[in-house]
């Protein structure tokens, strides 16, 4: 039997899909590309935005046309947050949510055998445990992602994720150790710890363990040379955490601190739990402890009620911080959130104009940061062959680096001297070892 997967959304979703692939392979299925004929197609959905829901529906329609006799399974955040909407998507013969993924293999086998439709979506419950999951391989990555946290309790006014992902729960350290050892044995030199609200790791247990404990454990595993973190909520990163991270030579100094807006008035309407003064001070602390740190972020423009003055304050703050990379996106109304009913919703035209202006600032910041690296020698983990004579990899601070060479350097860590900046990456030459 053949099964194909389609994943929308974040690194956590991608990790969960990789775990599902392994489970289906262990059950005797052959995993194929989603463009190929298959007996079953699994769609792991994202519901952060309404456009994510549209993409989910489009993918289901595509698979139904591609192979009308196949079993289509819809799982993930979209059916968990909007079960009534998901249940009426009749192309999906199986509909489950963002939990109990262990049952999906049996559901697909049952549907293939009986032809029945299976709906299994259970609301999240307080105190529910972290769902045991273990990744072994990643089909398209040199680095390995490991989910160590699920759930969110921040309830930002624009966000549906707390409903989709439920309460905070953390992967126990013994399970994490076992998974990391397996990934190291499979040749992964870089580990990225990810979560829905990664900074909250350990919170549900009264902070008996913290994110720094997970980092220290990962750094202790033989064979793992780099440990990186996914997106962080800034207000949960304490001085003690920073000092512990700085003491780990394997830790990668890249901090993706979700900003959303550089204007305090907008942050309050968003129900973010910090202000720009706190954010600025945190960045200063990180740069003091990690001199070569790359600070990256997400910035939303056109949030409900955002005035031109508020937008300009946010743009100036992005310029002031000097982010190494900024993901700029326009606010879109997400039904089921408080912000969907806020007054002052902006037009699509205005949001697009502000996106362009913010992206221009973000691009100038990125280039300044990368040009500041010219002349430095950095360690690069090479990932992909861009052309027969070009290899691309990433420095520890996640700056992309291109080297012109005929060597196949994939999954090798080599020292590179940065010579210039071209397009969206640094260009360097291999240094003498």
Image: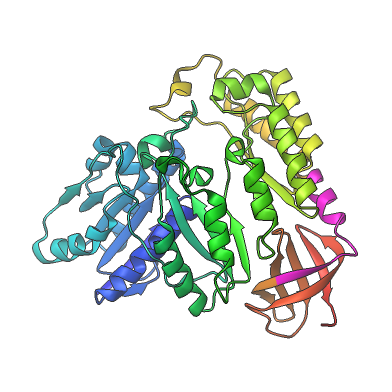
Whether residue 188 is situated above or below residue 128 in the rendered picture: below
Magenta part of the protein: which range? 364-380
Q: Is residue 163 left or right of residue 285?
A: left
Q: Is residue 265 left or right of residue 69?
A: right
Q: Residue at x 71, y 75 (%)?
A: 391
Whether residue 68 is situated above or below residue 128 in the rendered picture: below
> Which corner quadrant of the image does residue 228 belong to?
bottom right
Whether residue 406 is situated above or below residue 115 in the rendered picture: below
- What is the residue that sits farthest to the front in this orientation? 208
Expressed as whole percent of the image width and height from the top left, the position of residue 296 reads: 68, 47
For the question of whether residue 326 can be seen, the reply is no
> Which corner quadrant of the image does residue 168 belong to?
top left
- What is the residue that sits farthest to the bottom in this orientation? 407
User: Which of these two is toward me, 74 or 14?
Assistant: 14
Residue 158 is one of the magenta-drawn residues: no
Q: Residue at x 74, y 34 (%)?
A: 280
């Amino acid at each position: 039997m053949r099964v194909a997967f389609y994943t929308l959304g974040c690194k956590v979703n991608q990790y969960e899909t990789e775990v599902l692939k392994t489970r289906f392979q262990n059950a005797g299925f052959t995993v194929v590309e989603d463009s190929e004929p298959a007996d079953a197609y699994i769609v792991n959905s994202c519901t952060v935005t309404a456009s994510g829901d549209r993409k989910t529906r489009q993918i289901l329609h595509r698979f139904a046309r591609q192979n009308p006799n196949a079993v289509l399974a819809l799982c993930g955040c979209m059916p968990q947050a909007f079960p009534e909407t998901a249940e009426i998507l009749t192309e999906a013969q199986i509909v489950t949510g963002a939990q109990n993924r262990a049952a999906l293999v049996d559901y697909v086998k049952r549907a293939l055998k009986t032809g029945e439709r299976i709906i299994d979506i259970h609301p999240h419950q307080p105190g529910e445990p972290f769902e045991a999951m273990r990744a072994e391989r990643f089909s398209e990555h040199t680095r390995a992602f490991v989910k160590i946290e699920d759930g969110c309790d921040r309830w930002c006014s624009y966000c549906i994720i707390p409903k989709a992902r439920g309460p905070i729960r953390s992967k126990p350290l013994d399970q994490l150790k076992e998974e990391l050892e397996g990934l190291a044995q499979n040749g992964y030199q870089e580990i990225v710890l990810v979560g829905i609200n990664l900074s909250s790791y350990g919170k549900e247990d009264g902070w008996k363990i913290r994110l720094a404990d997970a980092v220290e454990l990962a750094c202790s595993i033989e064979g793992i040379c780099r440990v990186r973190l996914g997106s962080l909520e800034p207000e949960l990163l304490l001085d003690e955490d920073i000092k512990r991270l700085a003491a780990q030579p394997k830790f990668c100094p890249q901090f993706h601190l979700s900003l959303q807006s550089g204007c305090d008035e907008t942050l309050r309407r968003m129900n973010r739990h910090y202000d720009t003064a706190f954010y600025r001070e945190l960045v200063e602390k990180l740069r003091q402890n990690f001199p070569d740190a790359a600070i990256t972020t997400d910035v939303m423009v056109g949030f409900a009620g955002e005035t031109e003055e508020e937008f300009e304050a946010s743009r100036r703050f992005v310029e002031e911080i000097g982010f190494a990379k900024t993901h700029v996106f326009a606010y879109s109304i997400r039904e089921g959130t408080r912000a969907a009913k806020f007054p002052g919703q902006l037009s699509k035209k205005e949001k697009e104009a502000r996106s362009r202006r913010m992206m221009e600032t973000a691009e100038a910041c990125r280039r300044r940061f990368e040009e500041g690296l010219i002349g430095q020698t950095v360690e690069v983990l090479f990932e992909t062959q861009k052309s027969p004579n070009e290899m691309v990899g990433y420095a520890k601070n996640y700056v992309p680096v291109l080297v012109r060479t005929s060597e196949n350097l994939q999954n090798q860590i080599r020292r590179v001297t940065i010579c210039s900046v071209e397009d969206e990456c640094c260009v360097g030459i291999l240094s003498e070892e």
